[in-house]
Image (tube, grey):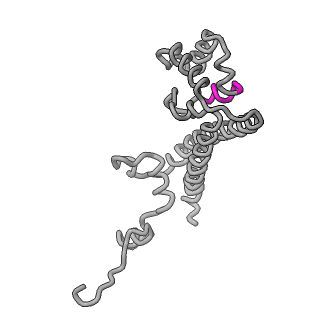
Amino acid sequence: PDPHYFPLQRLTRFRHFLVHSLVRTKLHTLTLLFLAESEYERLRPLSDPFGATSLALLTEYHGLDELAELPLDTLVDFLDEHSRGKIDDTKSLAKQLQQISADSFKLDDEAVGPVRFVLKSALQQVKSQTQTLQALDRRLAVEFARYSNTLCSVKGLGPVYAAGLTAEIGDIGRYEGEEALAKYAGLWWPRSQSGQF
């Protein structure tokens, strides 16, 4: 490995791994959410089930059943606090959440505890992986700034893809030409012909 590009390569490859792991964790969490609160997952009262307000709702309370028993004003205050005022009509959202709790499929009493435990654990894992990804992106930006490149000027290429390409390609001078780089990237197919075919 080229020692100059090795640190950037480690960061970009770890980011690739982390993103795939986070996607898998989120998909698994959505299935658990459907088991625990079927209507919450189906109706999505909040645009992002993994956003700060949604995570607070799902982790700080023992299910939406507990939210349904709260006074409406208490729930409205909770939503205002955790959304930082970004929700326009918290009162109607609070009513919707209480209705969702009433309409959701109810698990057997023996299953409620284990399902909620696993759901909370999965939500904490999503939160942790998201924080790790944010810290990694900041570190990646610092590391990538050390490399001179023009990839970020290409429309559609952001710093993550540009850093990944830079890390994997390395010094462009080590390739004999465009064809060699294309072969390295797997974008070149050898000519195979028979006569005029």
Seen from the viewer's position, the closer of residues 50 and 41 is 41
State how many labels appear. 0
Asked whether 119 falls inside the magenta stretch, the response is no
Q: Position of residue 166 (x, y in %)?
A: 47, 56
Q: Quadrant of the C terminus?
A: bottom left
Seen from the viewer's position, the closer of residues 95 and 131 is 95
Q: Position of residue 181 (x, y in %)?
A: 40, 68
Seen from the viewer's position, the closer of residues 187 and 54 is 54
Residue at image coords 39%, 72%: 180
Q: Is residue 25 above or below residue 46?
A: below
In this rendering, position of residue 139 left or right of residue 155? right
In this rendering, position of residue 152 left or right of residue 92? left
Q: Main secondary structure of the magenta part?
A: helix
Seen from the viewer's position, the closer of residues 29 and 189 is 29
Residue farthest along the left direction in this orientation: 196
In this rendering, position of residue 43 left or right of residue 29? left
Q: Is residue 151 above or below residue 193?
A: above
Q: Quadrant of the N terminus?
A: bottom right
Residue farthest along the bottom direction in this orientation: 195
Residue at image coords 61%, 45%: 28
Asked whether 59 falls inside the magenta stretch, the response is yes
Q: Quadrant of residue 56?
A: top right
Q: Is residue 123 above or below residue 17?
A: above
Residue at image coords 67%, 40%: 122
Q: Position of residue 176 (x, y in %)?
A: 39, 73
The residue segment tinted magenta is 53-62
Q: Position of residue 151 (x, y in %)?
A: 39, 51
